Image (spheres, grey):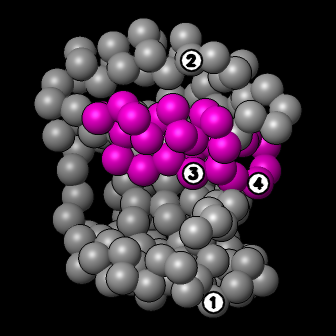
Amino acid sequence: MPTAYVLMICEPGSDDYVVSQLKSIPAVKVAHGIFGSYDVIAKLEEDTEERLNNVITKQIRKMEKVRSTLSLYAVGATDLFLAKSKQEEKNWKKFAHAYIVIHCEDADEYNILRNLSQLPEVVDGDVVVGLYEVICKVTAQTYNDIEEVVSKKIRKIKHIKSTMTLNIIPENG
């Protein structure tokens, strides 16, 4: 199933509004406010690439309060994280979460994704096309623990050139 991640910069203070609007779009599987260079991240799935592109270009990019977007299209489905994703859903409120976007060297994205899947804290991931080559989701007890995972585990993987951590803002309720 065609999948994309959309990173958004929003008008100041409007991330909750944008997240709530995104959650009303059927193709949006998850949407979160995040800390970092972007304000919101959404993961989308659609039946066809054309429908996925239409959601991004005709709905998300035209959404009120969204200033700019960066789309990362997943390349090929992977089942490396299925069991971990189910476990993460059960423990969502107990842990800190972040997306890590990764720039690779030497076109070694699939090996990097396989290495990431071996880390217990990495619960989801995809090879993507766009400004970055890999995106993964990390879950740990605290944001400090996420920082440790990124600096002591993820950045040590061979052929990773750089990373950007996008901490998910905890939702109220």
Under mark 3, the amino acid is His
Q: Please, is residue 81 above or below residue 110 in the view?
A: below
In this rendering, which labeled residue sits more in front, label 2 or label 4? 2
Residue range of the region highlighted in magenta in the rendering:
16-41
The residue beneath circle 1 is 141
Tag 2, which secondary structure?
Answer: loop
Q: Nearer the viewer, residue 134 or 25?
A: 25
Under mark 4, the amino acid is Phe
Under mark 1, the amino acid is Gln
Residue 34 magenta = yes
The answer to whether any part of residue 77 appears in the image is yes
- Give the crowd class for mark 1: few <14, some 14-19, many >=20 residues within 10 Å: few
Q: Quadrant of residue 76?
A: top left
Task: Specify which label sits upstream in the sequence, 3 or 1.
Answer: 3
Q: Please, is residue 79 above or below residue 134 in the view?
A: below
Tag 3, which secondary structure?
Answer: strand
Indicate the position of residue 35 as horizontal and vertical percent values.
76, 54
Tag 1, which secondary structure?
Answer: loop
> Which quadrant holds the C terminus?
bottom right
Indicate the position of residue 114 as horizontal and vertical percent values.
35, 70
Instruction: Report the residue that reaches farthest toward the front.
Output: 173
The residue beneath circle 2 is 63
Indicate the position of residue 42 as horizontal and vertical percent values.
49, 42
The residue beneath circle 4 is 35
The residue beneath circle 3 is 32
Q: Nearer the viewer, residue 110 or 90?
A: 90
Residue drawn where x is 43% and y is 41% of the image: 23
Residue drawn where x is 28% and y is 76% of the image: 86
Task: Specify which label sits upstream in the sequence, 3 or 2.
Answer: 3
| Discs 3, 1 touching: Cβ within 8 Å | no
